[in-house]
Image (tube, rainbow, N blue to C red):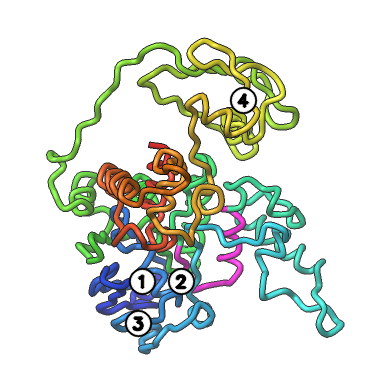
Protein backbone atom coordinates (compact mmCIF):
# COMPACT_ATOMS: atom_id res chain seq x y z
CA UNK A 1 0.00 0.00 0.00
CA UNK A 2 1.38 3.41 -0.95
CA UNK A 3 1.53 6.54 1.16
CA UNK A 4 -1.69 8.50 0.57
CA UNK A 5 0.09 11.84 0.72
CA UNK A 6 -0.46 13.48 -2.71
CA UNK A 7 2.43 13.51 -5.14
CA UNK A 8 0.84 16.56 -6.74
CA UNK A 9 -1.78 18.98 -5.49
CA UNK A 10 -3.47 21.64 -7.61
CA UNK A 11 -5.08 24.49 -5.69
CA UNK A 12 -7.59 26.98 -7.16
CA UNK A 13 -6.18 26.57 -10.68
CA UNK A 14 -7.65 28.91 -13.30
CA UNK A 15 -6.78 29.48 -16.95
CA UNK A 16 -8.40 31.85 -19.44
CA UNK A 17 -8.07 32.34 -23.18
CA UNK A 18 -8.99 35.97 -23.73
CA UNK A 19 -12.51 36.45 -22.35
CA UNK A 20 -13.13 32.69 -22.10
CA UNK A 21 -12.41 31.03 -18.75
CA UNK A 22 -11.46 27.43 -19.59
CA UNK A 23 -10.56 26.36 -16.03
CA UNK A 24 -12.07 28.10 -13.02
CA UNK A 25 -10.69 27.54 -9.50
CA UNK A 26 -10.11 23.78 -9.71
CA UNK A 27 -8.60 21.71 -6.88
CA UNK A 28 -7.16 18.26 -7.61
CA UNK A 29 -4.95 15.79 -5.70
CA UNK A 30 -2.97 13.02 -7.41
CA UNK A 31 -1.96 10.12 -5.17
CA UNK A 32 0.79 7.51 -5.64
CA UNK A 33 -0.55 4.22 -7.05
CA UNK A 34 -3.88 5.88 -7.83
CA UNK A 35 -5.63 5.97 -11.21
CA UNK A 36 -7.64 9.18 -11.30
CA UNK A 37 -10.38 9.40 -13.93
CA UNK A 38 -11.04 12.91 -15.24
CA UNK A 39 -14.33 13.30 -17.12
CA UNK A 40 -16.58 16.01 -18.48
CA UNK A 41 -18.31 17.18 -21.63
CA UNK A 42 -16.44 18.63 -24.61
CA UNK A 43 -14.88 21.92 -23.52
CA UNK A 44 -15.24 21.19 -19.80
CA UNK A 45 -11.57 22.04 -19.23
CA UNK A 46 -10.03 18.58 -18.79
CA UNK A 47 -7.19 18.90 -21.29
CA UNK A 48 -6.54 22.54 -20.38
CA UNK A 49 -6.17 21.66 -16.69
CA UNK A 50 -3.66 18.93 -17.48
CA UNK A 51 -1.74 21.13 -19.91
CA UNK A 52 -1.34 23.63 -17.06
CA UNK A 53 0.15 20.84 -14.92
CA UNK A 54 2.38 19.79 -17.83
CA UNK A 55 3.85 23.27 -18.30
CA UNK A 56 2.21 24.22 -21.59
CA UNK A 57 0.35 27.19 -20.11
CA UNK A 58 2.57 29.31 -17.88
CA UNK A 59 0.00 32.10 -17.43
CA UNK A 60 -2.27 30.25 -15.00
CA UNK A 61 -3.60 31.37 -11.64
CA UNK A 62 -3.46 29.24 -8.51
CA UNK A 63 -0.88 27.00 -6.89
CA UNK A 64 0.71 23.65 -7.76
CA UNK A 65 2.30 21.62 -4.98
CA UNK A 66 4.76 18.79 -5.76
CA UNK A 67 5.99 16.63 -2.86
CA UNK A 68 4.66 19.18 -0.41
CA UNK A 69 6.52 22.08 -2.02
CA UNK A 70 4.82 24.88 -3.95
CA UNK A 71 6.23 25.23 -7.47
CA UNK A 72 5.49 27.38 -10.48
CA UNK A 73 5.52 25.18 -13.61
CA UNK A 74 6.50 27.36 -16.55
CA UNK A 75 7.52 24.86 -19.24
CA UNK A 76 7.09 21.22 -20.31
CA UNK A 77 10.78 20.66 -19.55
CA UNK A 78 10.28 21.79 -15.97
CA UNK A 79 7.24 19.54 -15.64
CA UNK A 80 9.24 16.55 -16.91
CA UNK A 81 12.03 17.36 -14.44
CA UNK A 82 9.41 17.21 -11.68
CA UNK A 83 8.33 13.76 -12.92
CA UNK A 84 5.14 14.82 -14.73
CA UNK A 85 4.54 13.27 -18.13
CA UNK A 86 1.73 13.88 -20.63
CA UNK A 87 0.54 11.66 -23.47
CA UNK A 88 -1.25 14.11 -25.74
CA UNK A 89 -4.66 13.60 -27.28
CA UNK A 90 -3.13 14.91 -30.49
CA UNK A 91 -0.13 12.93 -31.74
CA UNK A 92 3.23 14.70 -31.41
CA UNK A 93 5.48 12.29 -33.31
CA UNK A 94 7.97 12.97 -36.11
CA UNK A 95 6.74 10.82 -39.04
CA UNK A 96 10.11 10.52 -40.81
CA UNK A 97 11.87 9.16 -37.72
CA UNK A 98 11.74 5.58 -36.43
CA UNK A 99 9.77 4.26 -33.47
CA UNK A 100 12.95 4.24 -31.35
CA UNK A 101 13.94 7.74 -32.49
CA UNK A 102 10.55 9.12 -31.44
CA UNK A 103 10.50 7.37 -28.09
CA UNK A 104 13.89 8.80 -27.08
CA UNK A 105 13.75 12.09 -29.00
CA UNK A 106 15.83 14.65 -27.11
CA UNK A 107 17.16 11.97 -24.74
CA UNK A 108 19.08 9.79 -27.21
CA UNK A 109 21.72 7.45 -25.71
CA UNK A 110 25.16 8.88 -26.53
CA UNK A 111 27.79 6.93 -28.42
CA UNK A 112 31.41 6.70 -27.27
CA UNK A 113 32.40 9.47 -29.66
CA UNK A 114 31.16 12.88 -28.43
CA UNK A 115 28.27 14.31 -30.45
CA UNK A 116 27.15 10.94 -31.83
CA UNK A 117 24.05 8.89 -30.97
CA UNK A 118 24.19 5.18 -30.17
CA UNK A 119 21.44 4.05 -32.54
CA UNK A 120 21.89 0.40 -31.62
CA UNK A 121 21.37 1.14 -27.93
CA UNK A 122 18.32 3.24 -28.75
CA UNK A 123 16.83 0.38 -30.74
CA UNK A 124 17.52 -2.17 -27.98
CA UNK A 125 16.00 0.06 -25.30
CA UNK A 126 12.93 0.74 -27.43
CA UNK A 127 12.48 -2.97 -28.12
CA UNK A 128 12.70 -3.72 -24.39
CA UNK A 129 10.19 -0.99 -23.52
CA UNK A 130 7.73 -2.12 -26.17
CA UNK A 131 8.00 -5.70 -24.90
CA UNK A 132 7.31 -4.57 -21.32
CA UNK A 133 4.22 -2.68 -22.52
CA UNK A 134 3.05 -5.49 -24.79
CA UNK A 135 3.37 -3.24 -27.84
CA UNK A 136 4.26 -5.24 -30.97
CA UNK A 137 6.15 -2.66 -32.99
CA UNK A 138 9.58 -2.90 -34.60
CA UNK A 139 11.82 -0.18 -33.09
CA UNK A 140 13.35 0.61 -36.49
CA UNK A 141 10.03 1.02 -38.30
CA UNK A 142 9.41 4.50 -39.68
CA UNK A 143 6.45 6.16 -37.95
CA UNK A 144 5.11 7.48 -41.27
CA UNK A 145 4.36 3.87 -42.26
CA UNK A 146 2.38 3.11 -39.10
CA UNK A 147 -1.38 3.30 -38.71
CA UNK A 148 -2.90 5.94 -36.44
CA UNK A 149 -3.54 3.28 -33.79
CA UNK A 150 0.09 2.16 -33.91
CA UNK A 151 1.25 5.76 -33.63
CA UNK A 152 -0.93 6.13 -30.53
CA UNK A 153 0.91 3.22 -28.94
CA UNK A 154 4.26 4.85 -29.78
CA UNK A 155 3.04 8.04 -28.11
CA UNK A 156 2.19 6.10 -24.95
CA UNK A 157 5.57 4.29 -24.98
CA UNK A 158 7.25 7.70 -25.36
CA UNK A 159 5.49 8.97 -22.25
CA UNK A 160 6.33 5.88 -20.19
CA UNK A 161 9.99 6.03 -21.30
CA UNK A 162 10.38 9.25 -19.27
CA UNK A 163 9.85 7.20 -16.07
CA UNK A 164 7.39 9.79 -14.75
CA UNK A 165 5.92 9.75 -11.26
CA UNK A 166 2.71 11.27 -12.64
CA UNK A 167 1.49 10.18 -16.09
CA UNK A 168 -1.40 11.97 -17.78
CA UNK A 169 -3.22 10.03 -20.49
CA UNK A 170 -5.46 12.32 -22.56
CA UNK A 171 -7.97 10.23 -24.55
CA UNK A 172 -5.38 7.44 -25.04
CA UNK A 173 -7.74 4.93 -26.66
CA UNK A 174 -9.42 7.12 -29.28
CA UNK A 175 -7.93 5.08 -32.16
CA UNK A 176 -7.71 1.64 -30.54
CA UNK A 177 -9.88 -1.46 -30.85
CA UNK A 178 -11.46 -3.17 -27.84
CA UNK A 179 -8.66 -5.73 -27.66
CA UNK A 180 -6.01 -3.00 -27.83
CA UNK A 181 -7.89 -0.97 -25.21
CA UNK A 182 -7.92 -3.93 -22.82
CA UNK A 183 -4.17 -4.30 -23.23
CA UNK A 184 -3.65 -0.59 -22.59
CA UNK A 185 -5.76 -0.70 -19.43
CA UNK A 186 -3.62 -3.59 -18.19
CA UNK A 187 -0.54 -1.44 -18.82
CA UNK A 188 -2.10 1.46 -16.89
CA UNK A 189 -2.88 -0.82 -13.93
CA UNK A 190 0.68 -2.19 -13.91
CA UNK A 191 2.15 1.32 -13.88
CA UNK A 192 -0.10 2.33 -10.98
CA UNK A 193 0.91 -0.84 -9.12
CA UNK A 194 4.50 0.45 -9.21
CA UNK A 195 3.45 3.66 -7.44
CA UNK A 196 2.85 5.93 -10.41
CA UNK A 197 -0.04 8.41 -10.20
CA UNK A 198 -2.15 8.18 -13.36
CA UNK A 199 -4.63 10.74 -14.70
CA UNK A 200 -6.95 9.05 -17.17
CA UNK A 201 -9.01 11.41 -19.35
CA UNK A 202 -11.68 9.78 -21.49
CA UNK A 203 -15.19 10.22 -22.86
CA UNK A 204 -15.58 6.43 -22.76
CA UNK A 205 -17.17 6.07 -19.35
CA UNK A 206 -17.02 2.27 -19.39
CA UNK A 207 -13.21 2.50 -19.56
CA UNK A 208 -13.13 5.04 -16.72
CA UNK A 209 -15.29 2.81 -14.51
CA UNK A 210 -13.11 -0.17 -15.41
CA UNK A 211 -9.73 1.35 -14.60
CA UNK A 212 -10.10 4.36 -12.28
CA UNK A 213 -9.84 4.34 -8.47
CA UNK A 214 -11.33 7.83 -8.18
CA UNK A 215 -13.24 10.04 -10.61
CA UNK A 216 -13.36 13.83 -10.84
CA UNK A 217 -16.05 15.56 -12.91
CA UNK A 218 -15.47 18.95 -14.55
CA UNK A 219 -18.26 21.07 -15.98
CA UNK A 220 -17.84 24.49 -17.60
CA UNK A 221 -14.30 24.70 -16.24
CA UNK A 222 -15.28 24.01 -12.61
CA UNK A 223 -14.80 20.90 -10.49
CA UNK A 224 -18.23 19.46 -9.72
CA UNK A 225 -17.23 16.51 -7.56
CA UNK A 226 -14.52 13.95 -6.75
CA UNK A 227 -15.38 10.53 -5.32
CA UNK A 228 -14.19 6.92 -5.32
CA UNK A 229 -15.32 5.09 -8.44
CA UNK A 230 -17.48 2.72 -6.39
CA UNK A 231 -19.63 5.68 -5.30
CA UNK A 232 -20.53 6.63 -8.89
CA UNK A 233 -23.13 5.10 -11.18
CA UNK A 234 -23.62 5.72 -14.90
CA UNK A 235 -26.62 7.91 -14.08
CA UNK A 236 -24.97 10.02 -11.37
CA UNK A 237 -21.77 10.49 -13.39
CA UNK A 238 -23.56 11.64 -16.55
CA UNK A 239 -25.88 13.88 -14.50
CA UNK A 240 -22.83 15.52 -12.89
CA UNK A 241 -21.22 16.01 -16.31
CA UNK A 242 -24.22 17.61 -18.01
CA UNK A 243 -25.77 19.37 -15.01
CA UNK A 244 -29.24 17.93 -15.33
CA UNK A 245 -31.14 14.75 -14.58
CA UNK A 246 -30.90 11.90 -17.08
CA UNK A 247 -34.65 12.06 -17.68
CA UNK A 248 -34.11 15.30 -19.59
CA UNK A 249 -31.61 13.75 -22.03
CA UNK A 250 -32.62 12.80 -25.52
CA UNK A 251 -33.91 9.22 -25.69
CA UNK A 252 -32.27 6.91 -28.19
CA UNK A 253 -34.30 6.69 -31.37
CA UNK A 254 -34.14 4.21 -34.21
CA UNK A 255 -34.53 5.32 -37.80
CA UNK A 256 -36.46 3.22 -40.28
CA UNK A 257 -34.16 1.46 -42.73
CA UNK A 258 -34.76 2.22 -46.36
CA UNK A 259 -33.23 1.29 -49.68
CA UNK A 260 -29.60 0.37 -50.22
CA UNK A 261 -27.65 3.60 -50.82
CA UNK A 262 -24.08 2.27 -50.88
CA UNK A 263 -22.79 -1.16 -51.81
CA UNK A 264 -19.25 -2.51 -51.93
CA UNK A 265 -18.78 -5.66 -54.00
CA UNK A 266 -15.56 -7.66 -53.63
CA UNK A 267 -13.44 -4.57 -53.10
CA UNK A 268 -9.72 -5.21 -52.89
CA UNK A 269 -6.33 -3.59 -53.00
CA UNK A 270 -3.21 -5.77 -52.98
CA UNK A 271 -1.51 -5.75 -49.59
CA UNK A 272 -4.34 -3.87 -47.89
CA UNK A 273 -7.66 -5.76 -48.10
CA UNK A 274 -9.27 -8.49 -50.19
CA UNK A 275 -12.83 -9.17 -51.43
CA UNK A 276 -14.66 -6.86 -48.99
CA UNK A 277 -18.43 -6.70 -49.53
CA UNK A 278 -21.18 -4.92 -47.60
CA UNK A 279 -24.25 -2.72 -48.05
CA UNK A 280 -25.41 0.43 -46.28
CA UNK A 281 -29.08 1.38 -46.28
CA UNK A 282 -30.56 4.80 -45.67
CA UNK A 283 -31.19 5.29 -41.94
CA UNK A 284 -28.57 2.69 -41.05
CA UNK A 285 -25.21 2.86 -39.26
CA UNK A 286 -22.76 0.15 -40.34
CA UNK A 287 -19.69 -0.42 -38.16
CA UNK A 288 -16.39 -1.50 -39.72
CA UNK A 289 -14.23 -3.21 -37.12
CA UNK A 290 -10.81 -4.82 -37.07
CA UNK A 291 -7.42 -4.91 -35.38
CA UNK A 292 -4.52 -2.70 -36.42
CA UNK A 293 -3.47 -3.53 -39.97
CA UNK A 294 -6.67 -5.38 -40.77
CA UNK A 295 -7.61 -2.94 -43.54
CA UNK A 296 -10.45 -1.05 -41.86
CA UNK A 297 -8.99 2.40 -42.67
CA UNK A 298 -7.88 1.27 -46.13
CA UNK A 299 -11.47 0.33 -46.99
CA UNK A 300 -12.71 3.78 -45.93
CA UNK A 301 -9.97 5.45 -47.97
CA UNK A 302 -10.96 3.37 -51.01
CA UNK A 303 -14.59 4.45 -50.70
CA UNK A 304 -13.48 8.09 -50.55
CA UNK A 305 -10.94 7.79 -53.35
CA UNK A 306 -7.87 8.60 -51.25
CA UNK A 307 -6.33 5.25 -52.12
CA UNK A 308 -8.65 3.71 -54.75
CA UNK A 309 -9.48 0.03 -54.74
CA UNK A 310 -7.93 -1.89 -57.61
CA UNK A 311 -10.55 -4.63 -57.52
CA UNK A 312 -14.31 -4.84 -57.17
CA UNK A 313 -17.15 -2.35 -57.58
CA UNK A 314 -18.75 0.51 -55.66
CA UNK A 315 -22.46 1.12 -56.26
CA UNK A 316 -24.47 4.22 -55.32
CA UNK A 317 -28.24 3.73 -55.44
CA UNK A 318 -27.67 0.56 -57.44
CA UNK A 319 -25.49 2.13 -60.12
CA UNK A 320 -21.78 1.37 -60.50
CA UNK A 321 -19.58 4.41 -60.02
CA UNK A 322 -15.89 5.02 -60.54
CA UNK A 323 -14.22 6.59 -57.51
CA UNK A 324 -10.61 7.39 -58.31
CA UNK A 325 -10.25 10.52 -56.19
CA UNK A 326 -11.95 12.42 -53.34
CA UNK A 327 -13.53 14.71 -55.94
CA UNK A 328 -15.27 11.68 -57.46
CA UNK A 329 -16.49 10.59 -54.01
CA UNK A 330 -17.78 14.06 -53.13
CA UNK A 331 -19.58 14.30 -56.48
CA UNK A 332 -21.42 11.09 -55.55
CA UNK A 333 -22.35 12.38 -52.08
CA UNK A 334 -19.70 10.56 -50.03
CA UNK A 335 -17.97 12.40 -47.16
CA UNK A 336 -15.18 11.22 -44.85
CA UNK A 337 -13.89 12.21 -41.42
CA UNK A 338 -10.28 10.98 -41.15
CA UNK A 339 -8.60 9.22 -38.23
CA UNK A 340 -6.10 12.03 -37.75
CA UNK A 341 -8.27 15.14 -37.75
CA UNK A 342 -5.39 17.49 -36.90
CA UNK A 343 -3.31 16.55 -39.97
CA UNK A 344 -5.96 15.50 -42.49
CA UNK A 345 -9.20 17.02 -41.21
CA UNK A 346 -8.42 20.56 -40.09
CA UNK A 347 -6.24 23.55 -40.85
CA UNK A 348 -5.21 24.23 -37.22
CA UNK A 349 -3.98 27.82 -37.64
CA UNK A 350 -7.04 28.99 -39.55
CA UNK A 351 -10.16 30.16 -37.67
CA UNK A 352 -13.29 28.19 -36.92
CA UNK A 353 -15.13 30.13 -39.61
CA UNK A 354 -12.74 29.14 -42.39
CA UNK A 355 -12.48 25.52 -41.30
CA UNK A 356 -16.26 25.15 -41.33
CA UNK A 357 -16.83 26.94 -44.64
CA UNK A 358 -13.91 25.56 -46.70
CA UNK A 359 -16.00 23.04 -48.61
CA UNK A 360 -18.84 25.54 -49.26
CA UNK A 361 -16.77 28.37 -50.75
CA UNK A 362 -18.35 28.01 -54.20
CA UNK A 363 -21.82 28.28 -52.73
CA UNK A 364 -20.79 31.25 -50.58
CA UNK A 365 -19.05 33.08 -53.44
CA UNK A 366 -20.18 35.20 -56.34
CA UNK A 367 -17.85 36.16 -59.15
CA UNK A 368 -14.92 34.85 -57.13
CA UNK A 369 -15.70 36.89 -54.00
CA UNK A 370 -16.85 35.26 -50.74
CA UNK A 371 -19.94 36.81 -49.17
CA UNK A 372 -18.92 37.38 -45.56
CA UNK A 373 -22.54 37.84 -44.55
CA UNK A 374 -23.63 34.52 -46.04
CA UNK A 375 -20.59 32.79 -44.58
CA UNK A 376 -21.41 34.15 -41.13
CA UNK A 377 -25.01 32.91 -41.32
CA UNK A 378 -24.00 29.39 -42.43
CA UNK A 379 -21.18 29.09 -39.91
CA UNK A 380 -23.40 30.28 -37.08
CA UNK A 381 -26.11 27.81 -38.12
CA UNK A 382 -23.65 24.92 -37.91
CA UNK A 383 -22.19 26.10 -34.59
CA UNK A 384 -25.69 26.15 -33.11
CA UNK A 385 -26.74 22.85 -34.71
CA UNK A 386 -23.71 20.94 -33.38
CA UNK A 387 -23.37 22.93 -30.12
CA UNK A 388 -19.75 23.85 -30.95
CA UNK A 389 -18.14 25.72 -28.06
CA UNK A 390 -16.07 28.57 -29.45
CA UNK A 391 -15.60 32.14 -28.21
CA UNK A 392 -16.11 33.48 -31.73
CA UNK A 393 -15.95 32.48 -35.39
CA UNK A 394 -12.43 33.90 -35.61
CA UNK A 395 -10.54 31.94 -32.94
CA UNK A 396 -8.02 29.43 -34.27
CA UNK A 397 -9.51 25.97 -34.41
CA UNK A 398 -6.37 24.67 -32.65
CA UNK A 399 -7.53 26.39 -29.43
CA UNK A 400 -10.71 24.29 -29.23
CA UNK A 401 -11.08 21.04 -27.32
CA UNK A 402 -10.67 17.79 -29.24
CA UNK A 403 -14.40 17.11 -29.21
CA UNK A 404 -15.24 20.52 -30.63
CA UNK A 405 -12.58 20.12 -33.30
CA UNK A 406 -14.22 16.85 -34.31
CA UNK A 407 -17.59 18.58 -34.55
CA UNK A 408 -16.04 21.05 -36.99
CA UNK A 409 -14.68 18.23 -39.17
CA UNK A 410 -18.19 16.74 -39.31
CA UNK A 411 -19.96 20.09 -39.62
CA UNK A 412 -17.99 21.02 -42.73
CA UNK A 413 -19.79 18.25 -44.61
CA UNK A 414 -23.22 19.26 -43.34
- Residue 182's place in the image compared with 189, above or below, is above
Check disc 4 and report its element: helix, strand or loop.
loop
Query: Along the line of sight, which residue is nearer the eye, 322 or 410?
Result: 322
Picture quadrant of residue 396: bottom left
Secondary structure type for disc 2: strand
Answer whether residue 352 is visible to the viewer in this image. Answer: yes
Mark 3 vs mark 4, CA separation in Å: 55 Å
Against 273, residue 316 (above or below) is above
Residue at horizontal 26 percent and vertical 73 percent from the top = 27
The location of residue 304, given as percent across then percent down, is 57, 31
Q: Which residue is mark 2?
A: 166
Query: Which label was assigned to residue 323?
Result: 4
Neighbours of disc 1 within 10 Å: few (<14), some (14-19), many (20+): many
Residues rendered magenta in the picture? 152-168
Tell me, yes or no, whether the two marked residues, 2 and 4, touch with CB atoms within 8 Å: no
Considering only order in the chain, which callout, 2 or 1, is on the residue closer to the N terminus? 1
Q: Is residue 116 left or right of residue 170?
A: right
| Mark 2 burial class by Cα count in 10 Å: few <14, some 14-19, many 20+ | many
Q: Position of residue 211 (x, y in %)?
A: 39, 53
381 relative position to 208: left or right: left
86 left or right of 40 in image? right
Look at discs 2 and 3 and give the one toward the viewer: 3
Contact flag, marks 1 and 2 (Cβ < 8 Å): yes
Q: Position of residue 299 (x, y in %)?
A: 60, 30
Task: Give 214 or 21, whichever is nearer the viewer.
Answer: 21
Which is nearer the N-term, disc 3 or disc 4?
A: 3
Query: If you read the primary sequence from the N terminus, does the residue marked by circle 3 or circle 1 appear first?
Result: 1
Say whether disc 4 or disc 1 marks the residue closer to the N-terminus: 1
Disc 2/disc 3 C-alpha distance (Å): 13 Å
Q: Nearer the viewer, mark 2 or mark 4?
A: 4
Secondary structure under badge 1?
Answer: strand
Q: Which mark is residue 30?
A: 1
Amino acid sequence: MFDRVPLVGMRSISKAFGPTVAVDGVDLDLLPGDIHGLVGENGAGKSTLMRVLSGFYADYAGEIVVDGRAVRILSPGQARALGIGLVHQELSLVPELTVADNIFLGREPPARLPGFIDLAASSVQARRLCAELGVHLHPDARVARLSIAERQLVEIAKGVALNPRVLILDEPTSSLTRQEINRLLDIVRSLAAKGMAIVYISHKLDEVFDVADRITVLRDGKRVATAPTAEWTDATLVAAMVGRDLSSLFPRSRADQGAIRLEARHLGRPGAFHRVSFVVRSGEVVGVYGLMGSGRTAVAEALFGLAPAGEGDILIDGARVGIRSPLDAIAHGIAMTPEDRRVRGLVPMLPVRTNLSLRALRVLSRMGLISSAREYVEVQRMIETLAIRAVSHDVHVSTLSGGNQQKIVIGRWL
